[in-house]
Amino acid sequence: MKDFLDELDNELNWVLEETPIEEKKSNPLPKTNKNTNNRSVIIKKEETETQQKQPTNNNQKNNTQNTWNITGYLNKKSLNFPQTKFYLPTLRDWYTRFIPIGWNNETWAKNMWMVQYWDDIVLIDCWVQFAETDMFWANYSVPDVSFLTRYKKQIKWFIITHAHLDHIWSLKHVLPALWMPPLYGTKLTIWLIKKSLEEYNLLEKATLIEVEAGKWIKEKIWPLEVEFFKVNHSIPDSSGVYIKSPGWAKFVHTWDFKIDFTPAIDAPADLTRIKKIWDEWISLLLSDSTGSIRKWFCKSEKDIGESLEKIVANHTKWRLIIAAFSSWISRVQQLVDICNKHDRQIFLSWRSMIENVNIARNLGYLKVKSWIIKKMTPKTTQWIPPHKQVIITTWSQWEEFSALARMSEGKHNSIEIVKWDTIVFSSSVVPGNEKSVGWLLNKLVKLGANIITKDDWEVHTWWHAFQEEQKIMLKLVRPKYFMPIYGDLYFRHVHKNTAMSIGFKEENVLMLGNWNIVDFAPDGAVFKSRIKVPIQDLIVDGHGMWTATSHVLKAREKMMNSWVLVILFRIDKKTKAILWHLKLETRWLVYLEEVRYVHKIIIKKAKESYENTIKDIPDIEEKDLIKVIKTDMETFLLKRIDREPMIIPMILEV
């Protein structure tokens, strides 16, 4: 316990103290005429222009005050980013740098990108990786920004491309650790981030700046120019970004995108503006590879709406339950229009769905009459015939206690699944979660529910560009270099082959791996550094943040794959002799019929190991004695019963 508290004190001191003189010399603060005073909640673009005109002599004062204020709001989880002695290699004059912070070769991982020019740093998105089997019951994993904590005064702003939970979840950890840099995003994105930060008492110290994609307006925040352009995705207000560096490097970053000519409530992707960007002579296109193995175009939202209408119109037995992600506002609008047409009542189940719908209604993204949509409670549903009820609920494929999972377990506070209920899965299975989704389906079927998935009807469309859409983006932007990003390495290689099939040279397709540093020269040349950023796999477990290589995860892995054996020796303090019978505690040890036999041989071998060691080395230290006993027992049990338990010898002196 003392070690942990000492470490926590050190981290607190490290966060609160001023930057050391040596660090100031090696990392000079950028010269800027923008006062990034972290003051309000939401700032319109006109205000940012006013801020840019403010004199620079207040910056030092504001930064000092900001440091003091932020420390009172820091989330404890954000303090646990490990310290590192790593320094970024010197960036040559007029060069522009790109670094992937996170897992660039995995789907649904903690992706983040960093752009650097001179001493100024811009970050794009802040992903989270939800719990998977290799995390061994940890909550989730976050991007490792440890190396950036020493550069926090140089981080000018965050860009968030859209408001999906996996893109914004880690902000509550990362923003405080980096001293709350200003954050830019479209209207819906900003308001959903606002809700997330409010839950963690960080909203008052956040600077959230709204931008409008598709207005052909560049955000001029020295030294970079950034323009948000309209793309389609499964949530409204999604955008790509065009970044122009004074060093003549120009980048287009699509992030998650698809091209839908008939979206449900969103405007189509702004292909005219994307084509116009080509006139700028783009240095690099970074583009989404998740759908690269799928040919042709992904289905339009219009087709999904037609399928959902047929299901609602023909449904006459009991309740209809639609399971979708809470951020899928367009799907809710489709169901509102359908239910209004066919005289159905919509009920919303689960907090995130209710809150997101509320925000979308207030901002004008969702147009709905108040009588047709209500929060689901036993009271609101009691007078509505079951066949007139359409329940929209959330389901999280990473969470055991999501709304639909609770229904399947009979633990939901407002609904109990019964025979004749129909459940429509209006979303895709996230890769890697097939088994957990299969378990959920089995539970629902046992309760008598009728299941409809995208394999039965067109009730869901993919939200990432297929091959033909990827080709359109490549041909519109026509960059000098192309980098497939986001997706498994196989997906990225398929995307590379798609680019080469329309004329890209292999040497102009950059397959940047995790931790790589790539610099773009003013003359267009590209330099890949031999130095790699030391990024670790960080997990959030309860109220702590740890590296995935920690002894805790290793211990959990061993417990999962074997069993636990605790051996208690009670010995005489003076003579070191064993006083009583050894006491054993086992978990997941053996089948009942072999318990007595195995316990007997364990006691005999453990006693023998202890006594022989004491006899040979009478003054052996306790920690060394425990190691000897543990090694002896591991070898013995592997040989006798072919098992490798986690063995914990304990010595109690009496």
Image (cartoon, rainbow, N blue to C red):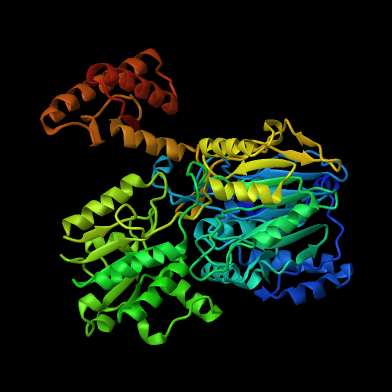
The outermost residue toward the top is 616
Residue 373 rendering spot, x and y as whole percentages: 37, 80
Which residue lies at the image location 33% right of the left edge and 36% below the top edge?
Answer: 559
Q: Quadrant of residue 413?
A: bottom left
Residue 449 rendering spot, x and y as whole percentages: 20, 61
Q: What is the quadrant of the C terminus in the image?
A: top left
- The relative height of residue 66 versus residue 547 in the rendered view (above or below) is below
Relative depth, front residue between 512 and 117: 512
- The relative height of residue 192 versus residue 128 in the rendered view (above or below) is below
- The relative height of residue 59 versus residue 337 in the rendered view (above or below) is above
Q: Is residue 518 toward the left or the right of residue 194 in the image?
A: right
Q: Is residue 511 toward the left or the right of residue 141 in the image?
A: right
Which residue lies at the image location 19% right of the left edge and 56% below the top edge?
Answer: 445
Q: Quadrant of residue 204?
A: bottom right
Q: Is residue 184 visible?
A: yes
Q: Is residue 653 visible?
A: no
Residue 418 rendering spot, x and y as whole percentages: 17, 66
Which residue lies at the image location 35% right of the left edge and 27% below the top edge?
Answer: 574
